[in-house]
Image (cartoon, grey):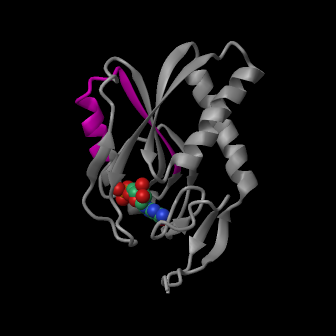
Amino acid sequence: MPATNPLPESVLISESHLQNRIHELGAQIATDYENQELVLLGVLRGSVIFFADLARAIFSAQLENPVKEVRLRFEFVQLMSYQDSTKPSAVELIRGGTDYLEQRHILIVEDIVDTGHTLKFLHEHLWTLKPKTIKVCTLLDKPSQRQVPVAIDYTGFEIPDTFVVGYGLDYAQQYRNLPYIAVLKLI
Ligand code: 5GP
């Protein structure tokens, strides 16, 4: 029998708040990268749902204002920083087919920035591939937990120091398919 997982305690960010903010982020990104090609670089696995909604929000912004054409490419890397627990561990690149990034604009799409170690590691790795620019879009930011300074260009929501799940974020690979962000009650 699998062990019972703790239950989400309360909704921190509702589905409608998420969607409204992602719509705003999409419009901002469409303006900033108008008439350019952009590589959206998703960090697996936590960012996948945010990534999919953000990519479509960028397209919607183009429909509302056809001047803002952004030619999107998709790329993914997989990093390991948490292993079925709520404590950060060392960062490791598990997958990253990113050899064509030279001279391209990259927008890293993250689920959450906590200590900053994951983002710092990824930034350093990507610069070795000689892109033209690197910017960062994160759905969630826990600024109170920062251990290393990182630059974030687009933030969905700043949240307090609490462990959250849903909308791509997991606890032991569970809860990723919640359509909202919830606080997890750890037993
Ligand atoms: P950092 O390296 O910034 O400390 O951590 C980034 C990674 O830690 C995120 O990509 C995510 O996988 C994980 N993480 C940090 N805080 C949380 C949280 O509140 N909930 C979940 N599910 N993952 C988190």
Residue 63 horizontal side relative to residue 29, left or right: right
Residue 78 horizontal side relative to residue 163, left or right: left
134 is within the stretch colored magenta: yes
The magenta span reads: 120-139
Residue at the spot 60% in from the left edge and 56% down from the top edge: 167
Residue at the spot 75% in from the left edge and 53% down from the top edge: 16
Residue at the spot 58% in from the left edge and 29% down from the top edge: 29
Indicate the quadrant where residue 100 lies: top left
Whether 30 is drawn above or below 171: the answer is: above
Q: Position of residue 146 (x, y in %)?
A: 36, 58
Answer yes or no: is residue 114 visible.
no
Q: Position of residue 114 (x, y in %)?
A: 41, 58
Residue 61 horizontal side relative to residue 135, left or right: right
Residue 130 horizontal side relative to residue 41, left or right: left
Residue at the spot 34% in from the left edge and 67% down from the top edge: 83
Q: Quadrant of ligand 1?
A: bottom left
Q: Position of residue 6 (x, y in %)?
A: 55, 81
Whether 141 is drawn above or below 59: the answer is: below
Given residues 33 and 43, the one toward you in this image is: 43
4 is within the stretch colored magenta: no
Q: Position of residue 75 (x, y in %)?
A: 43, 33
Indicate the quadrant where residue 80 lies: bottom left
Q: How many marks?
A: 0
Given residues 166 and 138, the one toward you in this image is: 166
Whether 62 is drawn above or below 90: the answer is: above
Answer yes or no: is residue 127 visible.
yes
